[in-house]
Image (cartoon, rainbow, N blue to C red):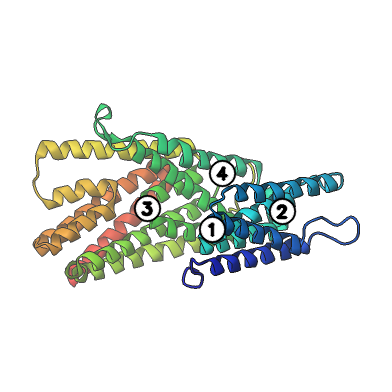
Amino acid sequence: MGPLLGDGPLSGAAAALGVGLLVGLERERRKGEGPERQAAGIRSFTVAAMLGALAQGLSQALAAPGLLLLGGAMVGALAVAAYWRSAARDPGLTTELALCATYLIGLLCMSAPAWGAGAGALLALLLAARGRLHHFATRVLTEHELHDGLLLAALALVAVPLLPAGPQAVLGGADVRRLAALVLLILLLQAVGHVALRLFGARAGLPLSGFFSGFVSSTATIASMGSRSRHGDVPLAAAQAGALASTIATWLQALMILAAIAPALARQLWPAALVGALVALTMTAWLALRIPRGAGQASEAGSVLRVREAAAVALMIGAATLLLHGAGRWLGQDGVVAGAALAGAADAHAAIAAVGGLSSGGLAMPTAIWGVWAALLSNSAVRAVAAWTSGGAGFGGRVALGLAAQLAAAALALVLR
């Protein structure tokens, strides 16, 4: 949008005119006809947007900021009058607020045409989607889903930002904000899985959700799937398919990281990574085909989020990381392999990226390969424990077996290369 709209006054005025016409056209279709029609339509909204543009332009040219307040007061008075006239038959404030917003967008267009045009398009879209939004809020969204959405928003916007960042000496060097962010991530993945389940059902929804969530955190995805399985929200095979689908992303993302950072190391490991991903894909498809069609639709009763399980997994990962780092300090810096194993317990891709960087800097290829394998092995162990912790023996056993099969097949491919 930026290249199409410059920053001059003509561009700003054109953007304001377009916004007024766009929003006004939407309101014109809803204002009705006859003496009972609403007060503001396409002409009123266009004039309001142009009034904002003129007020901004003249205030800058004449150094008279009072014009902005005068224009706003005029539009506000007209909005109040329009509401007073129609309050008996339509107590809503949408049109009146949209009129004031259009004036402010007209102001914005003069200083940032692209931002103003985008805000105007978003306002028009919001107004046009009234029926769909009303249906979603009253018919589709359940009371528990609304509660859980508000909980996620509170955690993301209030709780996590307020926690102290960085290692805390009182807690043995643990990063409280990172652990809280991991809890938030697990809860978000639970919500993603719930949405996918409602849209596509268990057979396709959970594997798709697991695959894409695996690019963020396979450990968190496995924990989320295990929790859903333990509480009976989805069939066991569906949760296992979603968990193993996340491991496909682990192999592919590791290969992409190495291809970007250490191409020589990637050429050594790409057969193993692809074989590991293929084994994970095969097991995921096999489990998905075992799910009856229409089974495991998301329940509208009960909470979507499992906060207790998410916190337990985050604490487990934090404790494992602290113990491994303590062991590393006690053993000393014995090499890249030990360091990769320690880092891989918390995040396999970060450890693989570090090994790849060292490989590009002159690290011996055999040592680099062993470093990548150490990261994958330690991370797979943590994922297996997370599966057992969140989903129990039935869920964790098959996930652990799948992880072991992937590693064994990938190791065989590397040996035979």
Residue 250 makes an appearance in the image? yes
Q: Label 1 vs label 3: CA separation?
A: 57 Å
Q: Quadrant of residue 303?
A: top right
Q: Position of residue 229 (x, y in %)?
A: 49, 46
Label 3 is placed on what type of residue? Ser
Density class for disc 2 (Cα within 10 Å; few <14, some 14-19, many ≥20) is: few
To which residue does mark 2 refer? Answer: 135
Q: Earlier in the sequence, mark 4 or mark 3?
A: 4
In percent of width and height, residue 255 lies at 28, 65
The answer to which image quadrant residue 277 occupies is bottom left
The mark that comes first in sequence, 1 or 4, is 1
Q: Is residue 356 left or right of residue 52?
A: left
Numbered circle sitting on residue 218: 3
Give the vertical position of 266 relative to 314 (above or below): below
**Upstream in sequence: badge 2 or badge 3:** 2
Q: Secondary structure at mark 2?
A: helix
What residue occupies the far front of the structure in this picture?
Answer: 62
Q: Residues within 10 Å of mark 1 (few under 14, many from 20)?
A: few
Q: Amino acid at mark 4?
A: Gly
Res. 203 visible in picture: no
Q: CA distance from mark 1 to mark 2?
A: 47 Å
Please tell me whether mark 1 or mark 2 is closer to you in this view: 1
Q: CA distance from mark 1 to mark 4?
A: 47 Å
Query: Which residue: 18% across, 71% down?
Result: 416
Instruction: Give the distance between the C-alpha atoms of the residues marked 2 and 4, in whole angstroms.
Output: 17 Å
Residue 149 circle label: 4
- Mark 1 sits on what residue? 61
Amino acid at dot 2: His
